[in-house]
Image: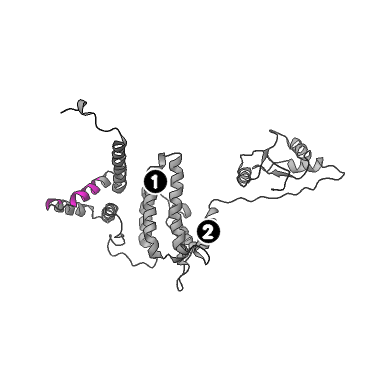
Amino acid sequence: MRCADHVLAADPDAPTPRALAAAGIEVRPAGPDATPQQRAAELLALDGAVVWVGSPDGDPGLAEALAVQLPEDDPPALELLVGSWDTPGARLLDAVAVMDRLRSPGGCPWDAEQTHASLVPYLVEEAHEAAEVLDDLDAAVGDAREHAIDELGDVLLQVLFHARVGAEHEEEPFDVDDVAAGLVAKLVRRHPHVFADTQVSGAADVAHNWEQIKAQESSGAPAREHPLDGIPTGMPSLARAAKVASRLAKAGEGARLDERVASLEAEGDPGAPLLRTVLDLRARGVDPDQALRHTLRQVEAAARRGADGPGPPPESSARR
C-alpha cells in the first residue's frame, strides 16, 4: 500500500479508508457518482501502481467493467486483495498481549513484582474513579466521555492484570480466557429470557429471575446460611448499609429492620439516623451512595467557586 502510486476510494470517510489514513497512507477520493464503466476508465487511465480501496457495498459491476476495458496489448496486472477488519472487541486481544509483555521476563520490573494482594488498592481506587465519572456520563458530551474511556480502561487493566497473575499459579492457574468464559456462561445462564424460552413481562421479572437463578447456582462457594452472608466487609459503609437493607428486604425482613432502626434511634445510637436516611432514600428509589456523591460534588464545586471568587467587600461598604 505504501509503495502504490495512487490509492483511491469512493468515500475516504468509510471505515477502511479512514483506517488507512490513520496508518499514514494517503487515500484520495475518486470521481463522485461514477458508473462502474466510468470508474474502470478512471482507474485504468492512471499511471503506475494503482490501489482501489473497496467500498462497503462491494462496488457492484466494477470488476466486470475492468475486465471489459482492459487493453488487449500489454494489459496491466490486476490483483484482488480482500481486506480484513477488526470485529468489536478485537482490541482486547492487543490489551491482553501488552499485559503479557509487561509481566513476562524482560518486561516491566514493577509489573513483575505485583501480586493479587498488592494490586487490590489499585482496583479499589480505579473503581471509585470510574464511578465518579460514570455518575454523570449519560448526559455528558466531549471531554467527559473521553475521560470515561480512560477510567474504564484503568478498570479493565486491573482485570487483565489479575488474570495474568492468576495464570502463573503453579497448581490452580486461571487466565483471561477463563475469566471471560465464566462471565459468558453466567450471562447466558442468568438470561433465560434471551437465550432460552423463559417469558418475562418486564425488567422486574428479569431481576426476580436473576436472583432465583443466582440462589440456585453452585460455584464452589459456601452456601449462604443467612441473607447477609457474602456482603463484603470492605465495602464503603454507606453502600454496605444499602446492601444490607436490600438483602433483608428481599428476605422479608424489611419491617423488622425498620423496627430495629427505630429502637436504636430511641436509644440515641449515633449511626441510627444515618441508617434511617438510607432506608428512606431506598423507599424513594434513590441510591444513597450515589446521592451523597452527587451532593458532595455540588458542595465541593460551591466551595471552590467561593475560594476562587472575589474577596470580602471593602470595609467602608461592609455592614457593621
Q: Main secondary structure of the magenta part?
A: helix
Judge whether residue 270 is colored magenta.
yes
The residue pinned by badge 1 equals 133
User: Is residue 309 something that shows in the picture?
Assistant: yes
Q: Position of residue 176 (x, y in %)?
A: 48, 62
The residue pinned by badge 2 equals 98
Helix, strand or loop at disc 1? helix
Q: Residues within 10 Å of mark 1 (few under 14, many from 20)?
A: some
Q: Position of residue 46 (x, y in %)?
A: 77, 39
Q: Position of residue 100 (x, y in %)?
A: 52, 62
- From the viewer's side, name the closer residue of 272 and 3: 3
User: Is residue 191 something that shows in the picture?
Assistant: no
Q: Which residues are magenta?
A: 265-280
Judge whether residue 237 is colored magenta.
no
Label pair 2/1, CB-CB below 8 angstroms: no
- From the viewer's side, name the closer residue of 268 and 58: 268
The residue depicted at 54 percent of the width and 60 percent of the height is 97
Tell me: residue 110, above or below residue 38. below
Give the left or right position of residue 95, taking residue 297 as reference. Answer: right
Q: Which mark is residue 71?
A: none
Of circles 2 and 1, which is in front? 2
Q: Amino acid at mark 2?
A: Val
Give the left or right position of residue 141, taking residue 52 as reference. Answer: left
Q: Residues within 10 Å of mark 2 (few under 14, many from 20)?
A: some
The quarter of the picture where the C terminus appears is top left
| Pointer 2 or 1: first along the chain | 2
Q: CA distance from mark 2 to mark 1?
A: 26 Å
The residue depicted at 29 percent of the width and 38 percent of the height is 307
